[in-house]
Amino acid sequence: MRGKGRVLCAACPMRLDCISRALVNGWKDKAVYGGLDYASRWTLARLIARDLHIADGGLHRIPRSRVRDWLAEHPDWAERMRRDGRDYWRRAKRRQRSRREYATDDPLFLPTEPVPKGLVQGSLF
């Protein structure tokens, strides 16, 4: 169902109006507005807010026409949104990895038994 909605929205002439209304009103539901689900709208809202120099959650404080004008001025907003979303999750994963605590006395490799004399390591006979 969502796929059909996205296809329908992609061809709609009112798409930018619909997206700007969804971003400014802050709809947090599972519906598709302008071909975007909530996660995509969230990523796009962060991108627009950063470009307009306002707080991430402050998009509802600006007029809807300003968001629509931004979308019209940036026809590559869909690609920028995908790139920004991908980079956001990469940064989040790096932060998560950097917070892991590693003990300094843990060996990097498992201890192995020494090779008996007369044997060559890796030989089968």
Image (tube, helix red, strand yellow):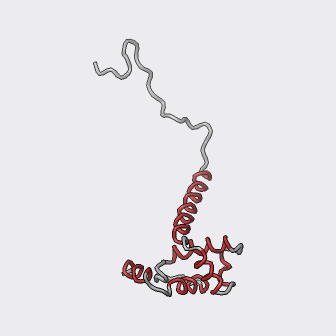
From this view, report whether residue 13 is shown above or below residue 46.
below
From this view, report whether residue 66 is shown above or below residue 107.
below
Q: Which image quadrant: the N terminus?
A: bottom left
Q: Which of 27 and 109 is in front in this view?
A: 27
* Count of picture labels: 0
Q: Position of residue 34 (x, y in %)?
A: 49, 82
Q: In this view, does 31 lie to the left or right of 42?
A: left
From this view, report whether residue 26 is shown above or below residue 47.
below
Q: Position of residue 124 (x, y in %)?
A: 29, 22
Q: Which image quadrant: the C terminus?
A: top left
Where is residue 83, by image quadrant?
A: bottom right
Q: Is residue 103 left or right of residue 6?
A: right
Q: Where is residue 60 in the image (x, y as percent from the top left)?
A: 65, 84
Q: In this view, does 75 lie to the left or right of 124?
A: right
**Residue in view at x 68 percent, y 84 percent:** 62
Where is residue 48, by image quadrant?
A: bottom right
Q: Nearer the viewer, residue 114 or 52?
A: 52
**Residue in view at x 55 percent, y 69 percent:** 81
From this view, report whether residue 54 is shown above or below residue 86.
below
Q: Which of 58 and 102 is in front in this view?
A: 58
Q: Position of residue 4 (x, y in %)?
A: 37, 81
